Amino acid sequence: MKLVDILARELKEWPCDEERILQSPSGMLITSKNQKLGIYSEIAENWITGDVSRAQWQAAVDALKAVEQPAWNGEGLPPVGTVCEYNWREEWHKVNVMALVRDRFESQQVIVQMEKDWNYEDRPSRFRPIRTAEQIAAEEREKGIDEMVQFFMNYYGNPKGAEEYFLICRSLYDAGYRKQVQP
């Protein structure tokens, strides 16, 4: 592994005022002015020719931070750092998953940070990924069509089956017909 990659992984901050760091054969980090930093590291494959500037180190650290974890697909408990929706008291709230804890029975719970509160949760069914605008619109469409079908069934009964009502209501909804709110 190259020295820049090792340093990006091991150093939390740049350890000196110098702009460049080298590595001795023993793994000790030294500055370009031969000042020993007292930090031993994994020996890099390019220790003889490789030195690292502060800018190179920062770029490697930023690249490590930018590595995205796979997106949570809604199955199981969300991983730490996930921003998702959480069903609390029959309402969906946008939350940040702060930590994963295990109780004495080894069951997992996540700690979620809500707008003004924290909560522990162990039920995956209470979480869902944040919905896109298209998903919200599709849910509203289905809800509107269901309400129209329910009206037809209450008014006309169910002589031929509800499938024809669904076809009619989908067409009406897509044509822009909606229930008008009376003042």
Image (cartoon, rainbow, N blue to C red):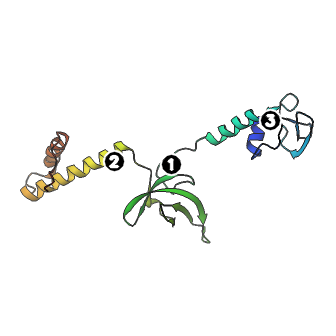
Report which residue position mark 1 lands on: 72
Question: Which secondary structure lies at badge 2?
Answer: helix
Q: Specify the farthest residue to the front.
A: 17
Report which residue position mark 3 lands on: 3
Residue flagged by tag 2: what amino acid is it? Ile
Q: Residue at x 80, y 35 (%)?
A: 3
First along the sequence among labels 1 and 2 = 1
Give the Cα separation between the discs numbered 2 and 3.
Answer: 48 Å
* Quadrant assignment for the C terminus: bottom left
Tag 2 near tag 3, CB within 8 Å: no
Q: Residue at x 61, y 40 (%)?
A: 66
The number of callouts visible is: 3
Residue 126: where, in percent of width, then height? Answer: 43, 61
Residue flagged by tag 3: what amino acid is it? Leu
Local packing at callout 2 (Cα closer than 10 Å; few below 14, some 14-19, many 20+) is few
Report which residue position mark 2 lands on: 136
Q: Is residue 1 visible?
A: no
Q: Residue at x 80, y 33 (%)?
A: 52
Using the image as rendered, state which of residue 93 and residue 104 is in the foreground. 93
Q: Specify the farthest residue to the top.
A: 49
